[in-house]
Image (cartoon, helix red, strand yellow):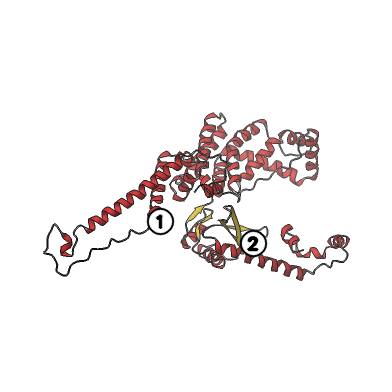
Amino acid sequence: MGLLVVKDSQPFSIVDDCGFKELVALLDSRYTLPSRRVLKEMVVKRYEEEKMKAKAVMERVEAVSLTADMWTSINMDAYLAVTCHYVDDSAKLATVLLGVLPFPETHTAVNITAAMRSLMEEWGTEGKVTSIVTDAGANMVASVRSLNVRHAFCFAHSLNLVGKKSLDATPGLQDLRTRARKVFTFFKTSTTAKEKLREVQEQMNRPVLKLIQEVDTRWNSTYLMLQHLFKERQSVGAALAMLKTDVRPLSSEDYETADACLQLLSPFFQATVELSEEKRVSGSKIIPMTKMLMLYLYDTIGKTSHDTAKLLGQNMVSNMQNKFDTTESQTALTLSTLLDPRFKTIGFYNQVQAAASVKRLTAFCTQLRKNAQPDTPTEEKPSTSAQPAPANVDNPSSTGLNLWETLDRDASEARTARNATADATVEVQRKKRNRLNPKTVEKIMFLNKNL
């Protein structure tokens, strides 16, 4: 019963539902359903057991990253959700939801910091967090800085802002979006219209698709609304013609505009979906994905003859540059891209930045090699005789002072540093020369086998 409630998000009141009682009695008349109170206790007990197991796993993990987001429920209650990401013993990406905290307080950086620090202390992740991913909100960014942890922006959220700002800044789309929303509202609120659309779709041997409503804060909902209207333009137009309504169908010029703009927006929608999954690491994809989106925009803008689509594309280029201009100079992202066997330096848009990133990687490897080298054993000094020899510049040890000691030490350190640098350079160049792996290869599994 506890698993039923958890896996299917069933309310505790299910045990009082007549139909459910009859089903259970039919399956096994001897089984006695628990009360609501007992069922709740069962679920809470199972939660505590699973939480203890997760904490035990977290104790063994050496490094984690966190994602944090503020969201509002349908009842307008605010919550802070924090998820932990790490690589498990089998070299697979794993996640643990640390908590979804009710957040009635104002969403200040101080309050968010306190809540996140509390979760980190509870789960023992302090000192293990390499980065925290959030949106670009000033309160979230300030909160991460207060925790003295590296902040990483959410690429999907930034893409959403690029799409939204670009759509809003394109005048030719405003009237089209307004009339598209009216078409959706008509079919949404009228059962007669909804049924007529279904009938027309079946008569045209079209799949019965529901129209999608645009949500002001999510550009991808605009994309899906226009996409579905474009796909169902014939069935929607036919249904509207058969119904008594003042709602005007979109014109052929409107659909031409929608089609041209959808071509620009399509790869952004694909990128948002791909980067929103939890099963694969995405940090190394950000730089090459930004590069491919920019190249696609330039290519499509150059080919389109539609004025509205051209303006939309120019707005998207401008917003992409504003949002991601410094992406290729962020150390964590550049090193991640270089070390990804699918991308390496070809993932960079700016090859000057790629070369600089190779130097940073070489310096990083050099430092790792220096740290890994054992300390050079101190040479045993020869014993001196009871009768000291006269001072002689050709025999500096006779004075008890070696004038060359500092120079010898510097030379030794230089040789060690030169060897470490040379080794690191050779290693980085060897990795660069290796054949690029297909994009389908999972990065973590590859690195686990080849490093």
Where does the image place residue 142, in percent across and percent down from the top left? 48, 59
Looking at the rendered structure, the kind of residue marked 1 is Ala
Number of other residues with Cα within 10 Å of mark 1, as a class: few under 14, some 14 to 19, many 20 or more: few
Q: Nearer the viewer, residue 247 or 410?
A: 410
Q: What residue do we see at 18% from left, 67% from top?
A: 385
Inspect this view and state whether residue 68 appears: no
Q: Nearer the viewer, residue 286 or 443?
A: 443
Q: What residue do we see at 46% from left, 48% from top?
A: 335
Taking 76 as reference, is 284 above or below it?
A: above
Q: What residue do we see at 56% from left, 30% from top?
A: 304
Q: Quadrant of residue 250?
A: top right
Number of other residues with Cα within 10 Å of mark 2, as a class: few under 14, some 14 to 19, many 20 or more: few
Q: Nearer the viewer, residue 204 or 196?
A: 204
Q: Quadrant of residue 167?
A: top right
Q: Nearer the viewer, mark 2 or mark 1?
A: 1
The total of numbered circles placed on residues is 2
Q: What residue do we see at 71% from left, 42% from top?
A: 211
Query: In this rendering, would 406 be left or right of 137?
Result: left
Quarter placement of the N terminus: bottom right
Where does the image place residue 194, in percent across and percent down from the top left? 78, 42
- Tell me the distance, in whole angstroms, between the alpha carbons under discs 2 and 1: 51 Å
Q: Quadrant of residue 392?
A: bottom left
Helix, strand or loop status at disc 1: helix
Looking at the rendered structure, the kind of residue marked 2 is Asp
Which residue is identified by label 1?
A: 372
Helix, strand or loop status at disc 2: loop
> Residue 77: which disc?
2
Q: Which of pointers 2 and 1 lies earlier in the amino acid sequence? A: 2
